[in-house]
Amino acid sequence: MKYIIAIIGILIVFGLAYIASNDRKNIRYRPLLIMVVLQVILTFLLLYTPIGAKLVGGFSAIFEHLLSYAKVGTDFVFGGLVNGEGSIPFFFNVLMPIVFISALIGILQYIKVLPFIIRIIGWILSKVNGMGKLESYNAVASAILGQSEVFISVKKQIGLLPKHRLYTLCASAMSTVSMSIVGSYMQMLEPRYVVTALVLNLFGGFIIASIINPYRVTAEEDILEVQEEEKQTFFEMLGEYIMDGFKVAITVAAMLIGFVALIAMINGLFDLIFGITFQDVLGYVFAPFAFIMGVPWADAFTAGSLMATKLVSNEFVAMLELGKHPEMSARAIGIVSVFLVSFANFSSIGIISGAVKGLNEKKGNEVAKFGLRLLYGATLVSVLSATIAGLFL
């Protein structure tokens, strides 16, 4: 039965993407089929085989070690505040390690390891997805550098890009997550779901964009110019990345404070006026989508509420909420976990359009205009990834 529901779910996702397509005649189905098959194969390997378990275990172990190193620095500065339970340990143990991970990414950038890896994986992807080198590079770079920082690396080409190519770049940035916060996710979700989502979203972004926004890149247009970072000394670079990581951690903390408080207030008002909380309302609206993703109907209401919470706030808020529902089945938790690992939420529209606008005001305004369409596509990517993961849970 779960396979039938999954197939129906995938067809519904494709149908919703097809309805929103701006050029249905130019949709190329062969690359779509290849990428869906690759998603299924990779998900099977990651969730269902000993090799996948070892890969996930190895990836998780790396982050466990990195987080333990980060904790040394946090303990040194904040001491006893880190130990115990509650929001203060969450800030120090989950958010503060972002500073260390960001510093490590800066070092790998400085010694040219990351640019090499990004180019190689991007080149391989370009042979599969039927799109250009720039789009493929951007998808991989977004998953490592972050949804706003990635545009700096291709700023030479931002002003020259037509609207349809700019959409794909922004869609990749919203569908993936930054490597600097993957460790934080792994402290709230099972690592295997985080890793699976990272892989699935990389292909899913191209699948949905290829339906909503199909186009062909000519040989003359298929040029990749990556902006070299300003020449800095090692310690100048290190200080910059450390401060960037700290800004991300503080920003996430501020967003959590604001969104959690707003949701609590709105829940209170709804309960007072209608006798039902706002999240309950969202749960009923999104329950059918949770069901087609493969969530058992008994858990669909709770799963729908978590999906909506992520959409209207951010993934951190929803992940914290997920931890409050141990009564959900393991299958439902796995599917919802995969859905939550992306930047597909309303606040990302402002982050991405702001990042592009900082480099080119005209292009930033274009991004703002198709912002809701961007969020629509990125949400479909999350639904598709969760549906395929549900085949093996």
Image (cartoon, rainbow, N blue to C red):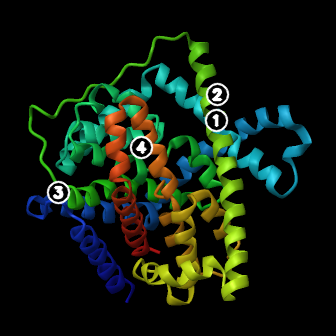
C-beta proximity under 8 Å, tags 2 and 1: yes
Q: Which mark is residue 247?
A: 1
Task: Inspect the image, locate mark 1, and give the three-letter code of the amino acid beneath it.
Answer: Lys
Give 383 or 368, whichever is nearer the viewer: 368
Residue 113, horizontal then vertical, whole percent? 43, 26
Task: Assign a secondary structure to mark 3.
Answer: helix
Closer to us: 103 or 165: 165
Neighbor class of circle 2 (other Cα within 10 Å; few <14, some 14-19, many 20+) is some
Q: Amino acid at mark 4?
A: Ser
In this rendered view, identify the residue nearer to me: 365 or 84: 365
Task: Give how far apart the Cα atoms at labels 4 and 1 are.
Answer: 19 Å
Q: Nearer the viewer, residue 20 or 208?
A: 20
Mark 3 touches mark 4? (CB < 8 Å): no
Circle 2 is placed at which residue position? 243
How dense is the environment of label 3, judged by Cα within 10 Å: few (below 14), some, or many (20 and up)?
A: some
Q: Which residue is mark 3?
A: 31
The N terminus lies in quadrant = bottom left
Q: Position of residue 166 (x, y in %)?
A: 28, 43
